[in-house]
Amino acid sequence: MEAEAPPECGFPPGTALEFAGRSTTATLDVQEVVGDPMSDDPADIYITSDKFDQGDLHGRLVCAVYVDAPGFVEITVHPEDGGRFVPPTPFPSTTPPANGLSEAEALEVARAHLDEPDTWRIAVSESGPIGRVLPYVLDGGYEWAQDIPADHWVWRIFAVRGDEGVDLVIDYVDGTLLGTTLGIVN
């Protein structure tokens, strides 16, 4: 293939490419995390033919220059060379710990941590191992979740106000607010 990857990819000049063209990482099945929302976004994608080292990346490399996010470039290792994140297996237990908070108690804790609690609507209230009820927080780069094992029981309270959404993650047993994630509700 005669195409050349752009300088943003950081490939040495003349790097042989297995693929160069516009597609999505999901279509080519080269996304780093299956289910990543950007996997379906169009990108100019360049895949090296040969394995090589580029910093912490070792193997055939995938460079995606996203069309709808100017300046956003993602460089990952090809999944066949070990570059795909494999989510943890969900914890199988459905038996909650003894002496856990009731749903009403968990909702009370959540409301105490919301600004202007009367302006929020509770959309979801569920309990279970965090690896089952909120698996994305374990691999999503949330500092507060780094040391929480997948089998740790929590209450997940999702509150909505207008187009704002917030997940409040509460320890199932002692009612401690472990962390929050903010989002936009469509």
Image (cartoon, grey):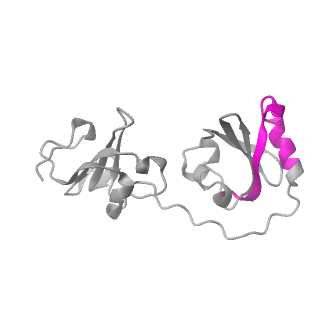
- Pick the residue in front: 6 or 120: 120
Report the span colored magenta: 105-130
Counting from the top left corner in percent of width and height, residue 143 is at 60, 42
Counting from the top left corner in percent of width and height, residue 159 is at 74, 41
Residue at point 68% right, 62% down? 151
Q: Is residue 118 above or below residue 176?
A: above
Horizontal relation, residue 78 to residue 32: left or right: left
Image quarter where the C terminus lies is top right
Horizontal relation, residue 118 to residue 130: left or right: right
Which residue in the rendered view is the most extreme toward the top?
116
Does 111 appear in magenta?
yes
- Pick the residue in front: 153 or 62: 62
Residue at point 42% right, 51% down? 39
Does 179 appear in magenta?
no
Horizontal relation, residue 130 to residue 31: left or right: right
Counting from the top left corner in percent of width and height, residue 168 is at 73, 43
